[in-house]
Image (cartoon, rainbow, N blue to C red):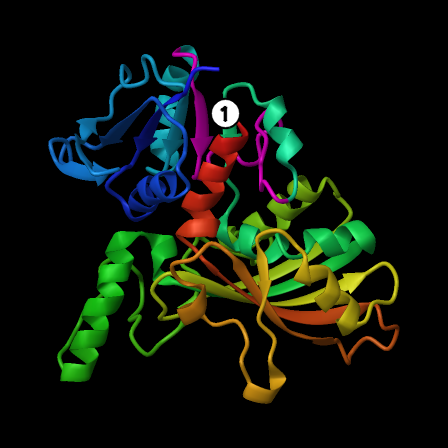
Amino acid sequence: MSLPSVAIAGATGAVGVELIRCLEERDFPLKSLKLLASARSAGKTMTFRGEEITVEELTEDSFRGVDIALFSAGGSISKKYARAVVDAGAVMVDNSSAFRMDDNVPLVIPEINPEAVKQHRGIIANPNCSTIIAITPLWPIHQKNRITRLIASTYQAASGAGAAAMEELEEGTRAYLEGREFTPSVLPHPYAFNLFSHNAPIDPATGYNEEELKMVKETKKIFGDAAIRVAATCVRVPVLRAHCEALTVECERPITPAEVKEILSTAPGVRVVDDPARNYYPMPIDASGQGDILAGRIRADLSDPSGRSFCLFVAGDQLLKGAALNAVQIAELL
């Protein structure tokens, strides 16, 4: 089998940088790597395996000879170039929301539904970061004791809004500490020492924002279970790159915290961090820069006398497992 040629669209962005790092750190077998970005980034150089690669302008002709195209350049760009990718014979692994709910596009978390990769027609979608971080730990539980309901409250990092939002958090924090005025331009509200409802547009019919509805719809599709009930509240917090989520989970049959902990202790891509004596549980500082989803604060839901519900707190790197790492894992399956 010949090695694939890989292209990264959006190579200079926050996720693009992590895509390059993941390919390198995981020793991804490839024949060549092409880095693509907007015209203003073309000509820059980036390092991969000790070699300098010049960033090229993304065009319709960029995918000749490419086998796998990793996209992290926004939904409009993915839609614009999808036909060019497929017509060139490449497979698009798309990190945007452009194709996630398309019935003809697999929505894949390799720890959950790797077999779905085989169903692709040239495009595979990477799920929303909040969805990945919430449901990867829940899948092995769902297999043993079907989950009927999920209530999620998210604490989402700046990286979900891109490198510019991360810079704005740093600059806003510096200004706050120095007593200077600072007007945000990337996000709608001051970010330093503040938190606010996720800035995705609100759906007037439900009152939920788009980020929350992604979690609802994507969970159903990935689990292959349209009956699962999901509610989410998504909030931006002043953290650079790791999302946290408080989950309340209801199962079909009674389940104990000890059973949950035992299942999670062998769950792929998950690391249990649950030390009540030290009050040590999943934190962004520990989740950042590594690929595992941290899971802890495992306890019974005292509001459910049936014993079928439990509470869980998780943390995961939004740029890695929430985006780049999951995409590279999909490429590995291909």
**Residue at screen point 47% across, 54% down:** 291
Q: Position of residue 288 (x, y in %)?
A: 40, 62
Q: Is residue 168 left or right of residue 269?
A: left
Q: Is residue 96 magenta?
A: yes
Q: How many marks?
A: 1
Which x, y percent locates residue 312?
A: 65, 69
Q: Is residue 16 left or right of residue 102?
A: left
Does any portion of residue 260 appear in the rendered image? yes
- Residue found 62% across the figure and 84% down from its top: 276
Question: Crowdedness of circle 1 by 10 Å Cα count: few (<14), some, many (20+)?
Answer: many
- The magenta segment: 88-111
Q: Secondary structure at mark 1?
A: strand
Camera-side residue of 83 and 331: 331
Residue of label 1: 123
Q: Position of residue 122 (x, y in %)?
A: 50, 20
**Is residue 163 left or right of 93 when viewed as pictured?**
left
**Which residue occupies the extreme bottom position in the image?**
277
Asked which quadrant contains residue 7, the reply is: top left
Vertical placement of residue 217 versus 53, above or below: below
Regarding residue 99, the answer to whether it shows in the image is no
Query: 270 above or below 272?
Result: above
**On the image, which quarter does residue 46 sit in?**
top left
Residue 128 horizontal/vertical position (percent): 50, 47
Left-right relation of 7 to 250:
left
Amino acid bearing label 1: Ile
Above or below, 149 against 88 in this view is below
Secondary structure mainly formed by the magenta segment: loop
Q: Nearer the viewer, residue 16 or 100?
A: 16
Residue at image location 21% in from the left, 71% down from the top: 172
Q: Is residue 317 magenta?
A: no
At a point 74% along the width and 65% down the height, the residue shown is 262
